[in-house]
């Protein structure tokens, strides 16, 4: 049995401001570092065999909190980066609405390829999913913790599970420093074991960086 823990990074100032991060390398803020420290003991109790992270600092530094407890090294993989948000990166969501009304409307409606240079959800799922698969392939039968990003986590897990866009649109996004657990066996393949797990004090209030029902998965980019 292989176990994959997909862990979203801690909070950033851009999360709080609702500024589109995408692949911009925005660091953790103080709250994000505290979230990582609170979550790390819970993940260490799962006795991971390997830790892999996106090479963006907010994910790599989140992973470092777990590495400090386990003594495991953190391997980085650029395939685990967040969705590329093209012309929107660095803009506040209000600015996106003003400058790209048509593309924003398509994005809000769940269009997997809305334009404005955004990476398509299909490409995102394949990219991040391949990173997840490579991480577990390196530790057959083990437990792997992967520190990544909200949108990438959703689409990468969906890719492994074989879930389409309609199904993924019903899945609540990960709060900062919460995780999804997938398990794999040779008979049944990948299965969802748990979702949005984390220390009760480390989540982000509604609207501060996750997405609720009716909000596109891409909202994790903020």
Image (spheres, rainbow, N blue to C red):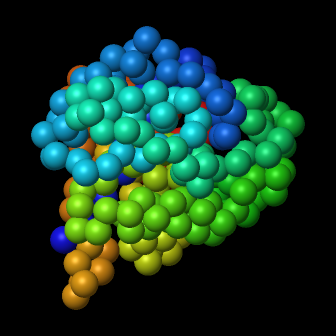
Residue 198 shows in this picture:
yes
Counting from the top left corner in percent of width and height, residue 122 is at: 63, 69
Which residue is situated farthest in the bottom direction here? 187
**In this picture, is 74 found above or below 124?**
above
Q: Nearer the viewer, residue 102 or 152?
A: 152
**In this picture, is 33 found above or below 173?**
above
Residue 178 shows in this picture:
no
Residue at 70% in and 62% down: 120
**In this picture, is 58 found above or below 126?**
above
Task: Determine the image quadrant of residue 68.
Answer: top left
Q: Nearer the viewer, residue 88 or 79?
A: 79
In this picture, residue 99 sits left or right of residue 76: right
Residue at 23% in and 34% down: 70
Q: Quadrant of the N terminus?
A: bottom left
Q: Nearer the viewer, residue 78 or 205?
A: 78
In this picture, residue 19 sits left or right of residue 175: right
Counting from the top left corner in percent of width and height, residue 9 is at: 44, 34
Counting from the top left corner in percent of width and height, residue 190 is at: 31, 74
In this picture, residue 70 sits left or right of residue 178: left
Counting from the top left corner in percent of width and height, residue 123 is at: 66, 66
Q: Nearer the viewer, residue 96 or 39?
A: 39
Residue at 55% in and 49% down: 77
Q: Quadrant of the C terminus?
A: top right
Residue at 83% in and 41% down: 87
Which residue is situated farthest in the left direction here? 45
Task: Determine the image quadrant of residue 94.
Answer: top right
Task: Determine the image quadrant of residue 63.
Answer: top left
Count every numbered label the image shows and give the total: 0
């Amino acid at each position: 049995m292989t176990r994959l823990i997909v862990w979203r990074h801690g909070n950033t100032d851009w999360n709080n401001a609702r500024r589109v991060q995408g692949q911009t390398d925005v660091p953790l803020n103080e709250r994000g570092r505290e979230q990582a420290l609170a979550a790390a003991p819970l993940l260490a109790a799962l006795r991971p065999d390997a830790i892999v992270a996106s090479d963006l600092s907010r994910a790599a530094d989140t992973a470092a909190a777990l590495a400090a407890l386990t003594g495991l090294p953190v391997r980085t993989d650029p395939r685990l980066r967040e969705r590329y948000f093209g012309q929107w990166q660095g803009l506040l969501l209000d600015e996106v609405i003003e400058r790209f009304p048509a593309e924003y409307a398509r994005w809000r409606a769940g269009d997997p390829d809305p334009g404005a240079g955004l990476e398509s959800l299909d490409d995102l799922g394949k990219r991040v999913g391949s990173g997840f698969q490579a991480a577990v392939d390196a530790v057959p039968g083990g437990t792997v913790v992967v520190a990544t990003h909200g949108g990438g986590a959703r689409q990468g897990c969906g890719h492994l599970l074989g879930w389409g866009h309609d199904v993924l649109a019903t899945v609540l996004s990960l709060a900062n420093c919460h995780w999804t657990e997938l398990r794999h066996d040779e008979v049944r393949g990948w299965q969802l074991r748990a979702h949005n797990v984390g220390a009760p004090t480390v989540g982000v209030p509604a609207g501060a960086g996750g997405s609720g029902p009716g909000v596109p998965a891409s909202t994790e980019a903020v």
